[in-house]
Image (spheres, rainbow, N blue to C red):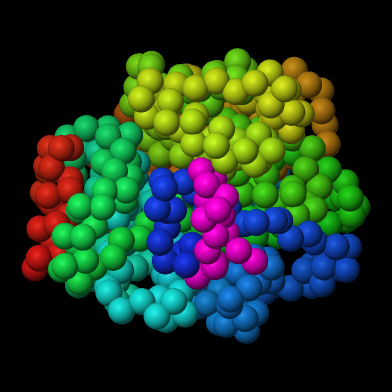
């Protein structure tokens, strides 16, 4: 199967090439030429499989320049780094209501689902494409991607990784996780600016031929670990398939039944994978896109206009504090009937004017499968407290945004079919806000809040977060957002 650019369908590359380069040279995103379909027989087979086998099977349908055995080798390695028995348990919290926990990986957030896989896919892709330069992974992060990518790529041969994060835009715990990162091929740097500044600067480097030739002279070619990379997105499709299999095998649903997924969204990569799963044959009724008060996506699905001219809010769900959701481009590509020119125009407009509008027809078709909503900071707190009291279930701030939006959806629609709230982080990743929500006391220090949250709830602190305070701080640099490119070039000169 070949991959084409959302901005120019003439650009066609293999899966390995798409993964090595991350972004298409025209600035577009790679998408599969067509979506593979899962049959009833496939589901019968998948149900019997382990999670690692399920992912390998789904990936083998997309990445045909890798064998199933090869992929299984990677998934087994990747998911053996997860703690607990099941890498992504589907927890039944109420009649017909499930929470899909995607945070049992090495950094306790859902980014691990794909970022433990991507380095394996990328290393193999480098060999398959005969790449001789080193691969430099550039990441702009709103918190969780950075740490998960650093963990995934640390000491992976032939790669270096640089992560930029907004100095005031991530949680204490996230910052601490990144500043203490180990590995000889890693560099972490804070910027004065917000996530969109970091992401825009990184994206510019990817399309700047001049910078790229300077990097090449220093022996490096760029790639991306952000969810614009197909190698990030593909493993995410698998957990939607897996959750559906779990519901089938528990007898809660029958083959062909449709379920709802409510997804806390930022860059739109997670929920997009859910949409792709539906195209493969997973029974999906509604994909509910949940935002915090940075609700550009809510407005977009309501009006058809994507407008970034709005105030940027820092919230207690920082991984969703995003105004430019990159992966929406892939969704619009499908809903425009794969009109590459139109997508290129809109993305141009987004860059120049900070906005674009889709047609009423596209909007109507989008609304047939997507529902939207957003949660305020108060809603988020209340839901954390409420779910802890009622379900005895402790959730993080991002998951709480989704739970709040799901509750609203349930009340207004009366739709009581089986529904999955996608849980993207462990509660201890955001201990200050979670402790405040359940105990009504704000403790500023993440380590202290962790201890208090533990004694208040009795919930176990996950291993990877438990020993953070014993680790050495290695990275403290802060730079201006305009100096990102210079910083990258300087790193490659070393
Ligand atoms: C990244 C992240 C999100 C947003 O996911 P997208 O794929 O960017 O929409 C939500 N919650 C957490 C905890 C995250 O780390």
Q: How many numbered discs?
A: 0
Picture quarter with the N terminus: bottom right
Query: Which of the 4 image quadrants contains residue 158?
Result: bottom left
Q: Residue at x 68, y 23 (%)?
A: 363
> In this rendering, is residue 150 above or below 183?
above
Q: Is residue 208 visible?
A: yes
Q: Residue at x 42, y 31 (%)?
A: 348
Quick check: 477 left or right of 367?
left
Quick check: 399 left or right of 465?
right
Q: Position of residue 161 (x, y in %)?
A: 27, 62
Q: Nearer the viewer, residue 416 or 459?
A: 416
Q: Residue at x 74, y 73 (%)?
A: 49
Q: Residue at x 38, y 17 (%)?
A: 309
The question of residue 291 being in magenta is answered with no
Query: Which of the 4 image quadrants contains residue 303?
Result: top right
Quick check: 9 left or right of 344?
right
Magenta region: 1-16
The question of residue 9 being in magenta is answered with yes
Q: Is residue 458 visible?
A: no
> In this rendering, is residue 138 above or below 133?
above
């Amino acid at each position: 199967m070949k991959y084409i650019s959302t901005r120019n369908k003439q650009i066609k590359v293999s899966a390995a090439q798409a993964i090595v380069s991350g972004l298409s040279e025209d600035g577009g995103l790679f998408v599969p030429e067509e979506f593979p379909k899962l049959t009833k027989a496939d589901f019968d087979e998948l149900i019997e499989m382990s999670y690692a086998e399920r992912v390998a099977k789904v990936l083998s349908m997309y990445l045909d320049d890798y064998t199933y055995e090869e992929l299984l080798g990677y998934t087994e390695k990747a998911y053996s780094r997860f703690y607990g028995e099941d890498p992504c348990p589907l927890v039944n919290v109420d009649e017909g209501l499930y929470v899909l926990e995607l945070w049992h990986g090495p950094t306790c957030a859902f980014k691990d689902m794909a970022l433990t896989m991507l380095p394996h896919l990328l290393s193999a892709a480098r060999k398959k494409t005969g790449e001789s330069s080193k691969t430099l992974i550039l990441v702009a992060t709103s918190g969780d991607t950075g740490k998960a990518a650093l963990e995934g790529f640390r000491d992976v041969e032939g790669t270096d990784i640089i992560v930029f994060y907004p100095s005031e835009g991530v949680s204490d715990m996230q910052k601490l996780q990144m500043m203490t990162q180990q590995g000889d091929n890693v560099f972490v740097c804070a910027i004065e600016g917000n996530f969109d500044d970091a992401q825009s600067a990184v994206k510019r480097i990817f399309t700047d031929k001049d910078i790229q030739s300077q990097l090449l002279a220093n022996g490096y070619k760029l790639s991306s670990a952000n969810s614009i990379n197909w190698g990030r997105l593909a493993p995410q499709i698998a957990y939607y398939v897996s959750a559906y299999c779990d519901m089938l095998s528990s007898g809660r649903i029958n083959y062909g039944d449709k379920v709802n997924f409510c997804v806390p969204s930022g860059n739109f990569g997670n929920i997009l994978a859910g949409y792709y799963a539906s195209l493969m044959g997973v029974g999906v009724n509604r994909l509910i896109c949940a935002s915090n008060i940075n609700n550009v996506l809510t407005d977009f699905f309501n009006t058809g206009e994507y407008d970034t001219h709005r105030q940027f809010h820092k919230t207690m769900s920082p991984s969703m504090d995003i105004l430019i959701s990159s992966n929406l481009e892939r969704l619009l590509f499908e809903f425009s009937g794969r009109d590459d020119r139109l997508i290129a125009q809109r993305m141009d407009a987004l860059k120049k004017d900070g906005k674009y509008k889709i047609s009423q027809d596209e909007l109507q078709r989008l609304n047939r499968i997507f529902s939207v909503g957003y949660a305020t900071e108060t809603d988020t707190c209340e839901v954390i407290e409420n779910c802890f009291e009622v379900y005895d279930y402790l959730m993080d701030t991002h998951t709480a945004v989704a739970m709040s939006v799901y509750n609203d959806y349930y009340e207004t629609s009366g739709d009581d079919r089986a529904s999955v709230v996608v849980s993207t982080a462990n509660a201890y990743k955001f201990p200050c806000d979670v402790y405040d929500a359940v105990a009504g006391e704000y403790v500023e220090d993440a380590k202290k809040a962790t201890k208090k949250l533990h004694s208040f709830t009795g919930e176990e602190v996950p291993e990877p977060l438990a020993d953070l305070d014993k680790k050495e701080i290695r990275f403290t640099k802060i730079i201006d957002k305009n100096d990102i490119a210079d910083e990258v070039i300087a790193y490659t000169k070393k």
